[in-house]
Image (cartoon, helix red, strand yellow):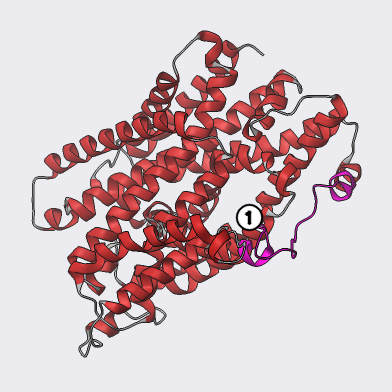
């Protein structure tokens, strides 16, 4: 199918999102709607929409591409994610709701002080900018390679147009709009992967039973890896524990996904949302791994050369070998995955900066001019879009490995201090010397980087995987312990405890 036809479908999809944005923001586009959707979101919409946000283009493209090298071992990581989500439901969400937070990093101010608060918020801004830029980068290089290179459109233009489209339908309604657009986009994303499986199965003349047995009996279906703990990054313990830490840090301590949960009416609906999301999340990842196995089996059966970059495998087969309808379905699914992740990230970054650094929540309570603050929010939204553009273009020249691996490698360094900060705040009652918190949060990732670089030599051939995030969090925790003081003796500790809400 020609690039022009595919672009028409993308434009039509964007116009649909723009119409939804108009419907959801025409009655209310103030900061309360933008930041937390007036705390009136339906839990089932939040749960379903979070699937699209959490999956993103990385799971859509990069996870199937890793199956040849890593088999289904990624599912070990997914199981760890599920346990981490339960920790979020039982520990973090009751704390956030008790304190009625708009930005979850305000907890750090209540627990430690202003410097720790700003440090945590800044770590999020850096972490989410890099992580979300990675996700959009993956989709941008695919669109560039398979569509826009044919028109000799520069890569930065592809990225800039994508960000402009996303900004257009999010700048007014913010989270209130995203709750609905992400729901629609999750539908497109899930339909895309299901239809891709059907298209491949039909091309290989497989019914449902044959499909299941083909994947199960293939060399790719191995899930659990127990050998070579020290040397193999895919070992079950590394993947499982790393999955727990990643979901707790990258979801439970991340303004992006928690912002959606905080928009629910109450804690019970928010917890119901997370439990529902967890079940669907595990199930959907099985489908993506099956897609990966089928893609490699299909390529081998048809004599298709597997691209050197594994991220190109899915688009190569979908766009060039399965027919026009499959190409359209793939592009719409990829666009949905991209928009669902990036629109949510831009909104969360704007929220965090406006609340954590510009203190718009306090300024609103003090009666400051409402229109002026909305104008400021729009400017911040534009600035973060431009930051995304610069970071993604830089990745074009820096990233060579599968993007799913790169994302979690970077997350091990950037989210580790957040993990340590929140865990120290929850598990300990000791206050810290607030001014020293940034030093600890800088030193911990640096020590981890040195340790990771020299692990093979220093630790008898050991190779770190996703568990490096745990090490980073522990180092931050120990550093905070060193700069801590005696326990609180007043009611503050009780206020910040994690006892269940009544």
Identify which residue is drawn at 54% across, 35% down.
400
Percent across and percent down for residue 262 are 38, 60
Is 217 covered by the magenta stretch? yes
Q: Is residue 114 left or right of residue 57?
A: left
Please indicate, yes or no, whether residue 123 appears anywhere in the rendered image.
yes
Identify which residue is drawn at 34% across, 43% down.
347
Secondary structure type for disc 1: helix
The residue carrying pointer 1 sits among few (fewer than 14), some (14 to 19) or many (20 or more) residues within 10 Å by Cα, namely some
Considering only vertical position in the picture, is 74 above or below 492? above
Magenta residues? 213-239
Percent across and percent down for residue 268 are 46, 69
Identify which residue is drawn at 52% across, 54% down.
47
Please indicate, yes or no, whether residue 103 appears anywhere in the rendered image.
no
Considering only vertical position in the picture, is 351 above or below 440? above
Q: Is residue 239 left or right of residue 392?
A: right
Identify which residue is drawn at 67% across, 14% down.
1
Residue at the limit of the structure toward the bottom, as seen here: 489
Identify the residue position indicated by label 1 in the image. 280
Q: Quadrant of the C terminus?
A: bottom left
Please identify the quarter of the rendering in which residue 145 is found.
top right
Is 355 covered by the magenta stretch? no
């Amino acid at each position: 199918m020609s690039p022009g036809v595919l672009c028409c479908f993308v434009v039509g999809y964007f116009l649909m999102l723009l119409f939804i944005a108009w419907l959801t923001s025409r009655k209310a586009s103030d900061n309360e709607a933008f930041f937390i959707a007036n705390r009136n979101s339906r839990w089932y919409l939040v749960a379903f929409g979070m699937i699209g946000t959490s999956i993103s283009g990385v799971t859509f493209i990069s996870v199937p591409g890793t199956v040849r090298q890593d088999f289904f071992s990624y599912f070990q990581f997914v199981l760890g994610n599920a346990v981490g989500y339960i920790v979020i439901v039982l520990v973090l969400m009751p704390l956030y709701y008790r304190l009625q937070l708009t930005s979850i990093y305000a907890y750090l101010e209540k627990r430690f002080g202003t410097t720790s608060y700003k440090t945590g918020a800044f770590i999020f801004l850096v972490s989410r900018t890099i992580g979300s830029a990675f996700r959009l980068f993956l989709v941008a290089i695919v669109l560039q390679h398979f569509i826009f290179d044919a028109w000799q459109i520069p890569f930065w233009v592809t990225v800039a147009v994508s960000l402009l489209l996303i900004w257009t339908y999010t700048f007014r309604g913010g989270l209130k709009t995203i709750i609905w657009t992400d729901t629609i986009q999750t539908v497109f994303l899930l339909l895309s992967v299901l239809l891709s499986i059907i298209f491949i199965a039909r091309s290989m003349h497989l019914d449902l039973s044959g499909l299941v047995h083909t994947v199960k009996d293939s060399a790719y279906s191995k899930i659990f890896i127990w050998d070579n703990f020290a040397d193999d990054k895919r070992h079950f313990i590394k993947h499982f524990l790393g999955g727990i830490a990643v979901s707790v840090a990258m979801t439970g301590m991340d303004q992006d996904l928690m912002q959606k949960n905080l928009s629910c009416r109450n804690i019970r609906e928010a917890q119901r949302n997370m439990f529902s999301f967890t079940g669907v999340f595990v199930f959907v990842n099985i489908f993506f791994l099956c897609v990966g196995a089928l893609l490699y089996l299909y390529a081998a059966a048809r004599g298709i050369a597997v691209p050197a970059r594994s991220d190109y495998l899915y688009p190569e087969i979908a766009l060039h070998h399965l027919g026009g309808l499959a190409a359209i379905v793939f592009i719409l699914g990829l666009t949905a995955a991209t928009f669902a992740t990036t629109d949510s990230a831009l909104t969360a970054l704007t929220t965090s900066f406006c609340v954590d650094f510009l203190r718009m929540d306090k300024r609103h309570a003090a009666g400051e001019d409402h229109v002026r603050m909305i104008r400021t929010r729009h400017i911040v939204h534009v600035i973060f879009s431009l930051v995304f553009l610069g970071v993604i273009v830089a990745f074009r020249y820096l990233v060579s490995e599968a993007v799913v691996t790169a994302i979690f490698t970077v997350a091990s360094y950037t989210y580790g201090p957040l993990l340590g900060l929140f865990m120290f705040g929850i598990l300990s009652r000791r206050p810290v010397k607030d001014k020293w918190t940034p030093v600890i949060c800088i030193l911990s990732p640096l020590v981890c980087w040195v340790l990771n670089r020299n692990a093979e030599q220093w630790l008898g051939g050991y190779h770190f995987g996703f568990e490096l995030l745990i090490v980073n969090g522990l180092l931050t925790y120990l550093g905070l312990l060193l700069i801590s003081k005696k326990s609180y003796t007043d009611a503050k500790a009780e206020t910040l405890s994690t006892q269940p809400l009544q």
